[in-house]
Amino acid sequence: MRDDPTFVDQIQRDLRDVRWLGPEEIRSRARRRSQRRIVVATVVLALAGVSAVAVADPGESPSPARPAAAPSASPARHEITLDALLQPADLPQQVDVQLSQSGLGEPVLLDHMLGVCRTSQGRSDGWQMSILSRSQTLVPKRAPAILSESDGLVTQDLFRLTPDAAVQLLATLDDLVAPCAEWTSVGGYALGGATGTGAATHRWAVVQRGFAGDGAALLRHTSSQPVDQKTGKPIGNAPRPTSTAVVRVGDLVTVLSLGQGGTEQELPRLAAVAARRMCAAANPAC
């Protein structure tokens, strides 16, 4: 799967005139989705110094044991075929596919900043590991080559996991998010010749479930306006909320995000279409 650009590149894409400090200190080791998630940080966060506000820790209880799936009459599928992904005809406008890639043993990364929040508190990032995966970004027809996923219309990552891991991912999502119900990140910034230390407060919540496939969840990430810690003045532009749809069909899990022009209301419909497409490669068969 593709590597994320640096935090510097991500913020420069959204604010254009922002220059980040110390890029060598803030290179992300996550893949794919940090472009869309770092938008909410605007001009702060996840630099060398990251701190979290105190929040209640509800604990991360293990998922209960689940009965084994009934044997399938057909041979188990392994490869994720292209027809298991969203197709251009599934979108209301004409689109092309860019940044289509595949990988082995990738983490099912839902939101890069959520992982940063968790690890800043001494926790694991919480990501399940996949067996294999495919990803694609859909862009407007005849659009120029895009620089990042957030420039596209829709980005989809599709993962095959072990059956237990696929079920557990959605079953434990609330526990994954709970430590980051409210989290503050602090870091240096440089903007228009001014430098300082900024801060923003992030919030994650699961806001909808059960709208597609064998299980689905809508994860929303919001962030406060970043401010200078010394002066209290706003830094850059107010970030917009971002949403991610997570859908399971059998042993497949897909993660869907919309580009800058998309809205949260569009995701459940698109997730339902994606779930139907996933039947082409799921175990057990739909």
Image (spheres, rainbow, N blue to C red):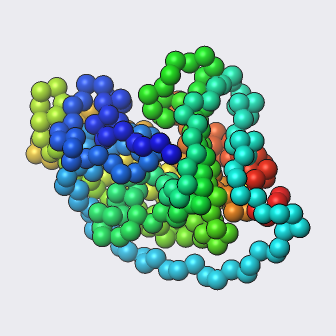
Residue 209, horizontal then vertical, whole percent: 64, 59
* Residue 226, placed above or below residue 249: above
Residue 170 visible in this rendered orientation of the protein: no
Residue at horizontal 48 percent and vertical 63 percent from the top: 127
Left or right, 168 with reference to 176 = right
* Residue nearest the observer in this picture, 251 or 206: 251
Q: Quadrant of residue 153?
A: top right
Q: How many marks?
A: 0
* Residue 113, placed above or below residue 174: above
Residue at horizontal 57 percent and vertical 40 percent from the top: 101
* Residue 239, placed above or below residue 97: below
Left or right, 251 with reference to 188 = right
Q: Where is the C terminus found, in terms of image quarters?
A: bottom right
Residue 66 visible in this rendered orientation of the protein: yes
Residue at horizontal 29 percent and vertical 46 percent from the top: 27
* Residue nearest the observer in this picture, 186 or 69: 69
Residue at horizontal 75 percent and vertical 53 percent from the top: 281
Residue 252, horizontal then vertical, whole percent: 67, 58
Residue 70, horizontal then vertical, whole percent: 82, 75
| Extreme residue in the right direction | 73
Left or right, 63 with reference to 55 = right
Residue 66, horizontal then vertical, whole percent: 68, 80
* Residue 63, placed above or below residue 14: below
